[in-house]
Amino acid sequence: MRFVPCALAAVLLAGLAGAVDAGTLDDVRARGILHCGVGGDVPGFSAVDESGRLRGMDVDFCGAVAAVVLGDATKVKFTSLTAKQRFLALQSGEIDLLARNTTWTLQRDTALALNFTGVMYYDGQGFMVRRALGVENARELAGASVCVNIGTTTVLNLGDFFRVNNMDFKQVPFESSEEAVAAYDAGRCDAYTGDRSLLAGQRLKLSEPDAHVILPDTISKEPLGPVVRHGDDQWFDIVKWTLFCLIGAEEQGLTMGSVDAATTEAKDPATRRLLGLDGDLGKDLGVSAQWCQAAVKQVGNYGEIYDRHLGPGSPIGLPRGHNAQWRDGGLHYAMPIR
């Protein structure tokens, strides 16, 4: 091992700190707005509602990051991106953060020079077909034509599934989910494949939603999460810990409506740290001590966000399943905020 003299080490550390400081956080603060890439046509994650407002889990997550770094969840400029466009937009610096129901894979995490900051939604790929076909499972789709979005893991999984089961199929590719669901609705293919949450949302767009069914098969693992560029560890940390903040707030029972009262009444050490009442953990992230408090107060905890856009009380109506808290048999688990 080669030892670096203390004076030289101090210079190197100062240089490293400068490199980290002069990154995405400074850019966002200088312009006063977060540039966030979303799908824009995926109900439950990012889609325009009847009032013309963009809504969904991914939209709220972008708002949470803006609350953490700018103090205001509304300080976000959204860019709608197709699956094919999304990674180039992030790599080129057009957006600061990609929050677009994107699957975490080894190649994307390495060869594309991207960092996934965690899992926002645990999903899996499925198939939707017309009830009139009488199909009960995906292994009955031999010879079927299947609508699919290009530039996605969905295409690869589709090929794998039919090869493994020794079945022929015809792939009908489209640039966007909007085009794919429209083609399926028009009868251009026998089935439509995608993440099960995507299918549940797209089913609402069909001319006769009740005439279609999502088959029970789940043919892949699709961990969907926010993505940032390689090379900016501070920004990576901020986005990653924003997600843990939302999950941790639900663990602690903190909601949009209870945050204010908790700031004067909370006695639990974990809750007080999360709210920034004890210590200043935000300092290590480069944000205010009340960073997590601001996110939860303005967009809600993870459970509130889920229920609002995907839960049983929403139009999509999906149960929590794998996306429940670990204490409830799900996979969500916040790293300790301490």
Image: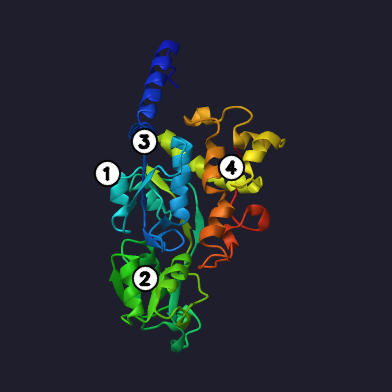
1 or 3: tag closer to the N-terminus: 3
Q: Amino acid at mark 2?
A: Gly
Circle 2 packing at 10 Å, graded few (<14), some (14-19), many (20+), is: some
Q: Position of residue 166 (x, y in %)?
A: 40, 79
What separation in Å lies between label 2 and label 4 (alpha carbons)?
36 Å
Quadrant position of the C terminus in the picture: top right
The kind of residue tagged 4 is: Met
Camera sees residue 63: yes
User: In the image, is residue 87 above or below residue 221?
Assistant: above
- Left or right of residue 122, residue 193 in this image: left
- Marks 1 and 2, Cα distance to the nearest angstrom? 30 Å
Name the residue located 36 percent from the left edge and 72 percent from the top edge.
Answer: 181
Assess whether mark 4 and mark 2 are in contact (beta carbons under 8 angstroms). no
- Kindly identify which residue carries mark 4: 335
Closer to viewer: mark 1 or mark 3: 3
Looking at marks 2 and 4 on the same chain, the residue that comes earlier in the sequence is marked by: 2
Which residue carries the number 3 mark?
32
- Categorize mark 1 by other alpha carbons within 10 Å: few (<14), some (14-19), many (20+): few
For residue 50, which quarter of the picture? bottom left
**Residue 169 visible in image:** no
